[in-house]
Image (cartoon, rainbow, N blue to C red):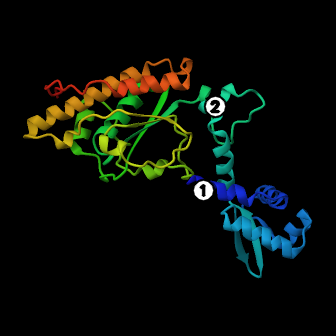
Amino acid sequence: MELHDLAGRFAALAHPTRVALIRLLVGAGPGGLPAGEIAAAVGVAPSSLSFHLRELEGAGLIRAARAGRIIRYAAERDAVRGLAAFLTETCCDGRPELCGEGFATPSGTTPMATRPYTVLFLCTGNSHRSIMAEAILNREGAGRFRAFSAGSHPEGAVAPETLDLLRRLDYPVAGLRSKSWDEFALARPGAPALDFVFTVCDAAAGEICPTWPGQPLTAHWGVPDPARAAGGAAERGIALSDTYRMLANRIGIFVNLPLRSLDRLALQQRLDEIGRLPRTPRLTPIAA
C-alpha cells in the first residue's frame, strides 16, 4: 500500500472515539457487533456513531454487513495489523532485538535474531537471471537466507534452458515460477518483510519500484541477459553459464559478509561493491 493510503488510515484514527471503536471491534472478532451494541459500549449518540463508522469504513479499517434487518460492523483485522507492522517493522534498522525488552515485536513477525534474512531478486521478465539468483541463494544460504524473485513485467514462465541448467547443477526447481513484483509490495497480503532487494538487470534498476515492506537495503547487481546472446545454441549456452557464474560469485561473497557486525552504511557500501564486480565472461559452457 502506498504511503498516502496508510496516512489516510492513520488520519481516520485521529479521534478518541474511533480509536475506541477499533479496539472494540477487533476484540469482537470476525462476526462484529450491531450498531446498538457498539453505541452502548462506547457511549456515543447514534448520530455521532454513524459518522465515526463511516470514517472508519471509508478508510478500509472496518466493514459493514447486513444480517436480515441488522447491520453488523467488524474490524478489517489485516488492515489494522498492517498499520502496526508499518510502524514497527523497521525498528533498529530492521533488527528489533536491539530495541530493548520494552519493544514488542508485531504479531505474526519474528525478530531478526531468530529468522533468516529475506532477499528479493528483481529483473524485468523473471525468467532467467533473477530465477537463478533465487535458486543459488536458497541453496548457498540455507538456514540463514530465504530468497525470492520477481519481475516488473514477468514472462509468466521460467525459461526452459534456465531450468535445465539448474537441474544439471542439482538445484531444486519445483517451486520456481515467473511472477510480478506486485506480490511483494507493501501491504500486499502475505508479502514478507524484506531485508535486501537486488536488481540483476539494468532495465529493472531504472524502473520505479513499489514500496517494499521492511525498508530493505537495495543494490544493483546487473549481469548480462543470456536471452540476448547472439549466435546459435552453443553461444547461448555459454552466455547462460557465464550469467550463472557471475551470480554465484556475487552471492557467494554476500553470504559470507559479517551482516550482524556491519552498520547499515557499511553494509550498503559492501553491497554496492559486489554490484561493481566485473562482468567478465569465461566463454566456456557448464558441463552436463
Residue 22 image offset from top left, x and y in percent: 78, 58
Q: Of 187 and 164, which appears nearest the observer?
A: 187
Instruction: Specify the amino acid type for callout 2.
Output: Pro
Q: Considering the image in quadrants, where does the C terminus appear?
A: top left
In the rendered structure, find residue 111 and report the number of the disc placed on it: 2
Residue 89 image offset from top left, x and y in percent: 63, 39
Instruction: Specify the amino acid type for callout 1.
Output: His
SS at mark 1?
A: helix
Residue 105 appears left or right of 160: right
Q: Considering the image in quadrants, where does the N terminus appear?
A: bottom right
Q: Of 170 and 24, which appears nearest the observer?
A: 24
Splitting the image into 4 quarters, where does residue 214 fall? Answer: top right
Total tally of numbered discs in the picture: 2
Splitting the image into 4 quarters, where does residue 95 fall? Answer: top right
Residue 47 image offset from top left, x and y in percent: 85, 76
Q: Of 102 and 263, which appears nearest the observer?
A: 263
Confirm whether residue 185 shows in the render.
Answer: yes
Residue 168 image offset from top left, x and y in percent: 23, 31
Residue located 30% across and 48% down the image = 125
SS at mark 2?
A: loop
| Residue to which mark 1 is pinned | 4
Q: Earlier in the sequence, mark 1 or mark 2?
A: 1
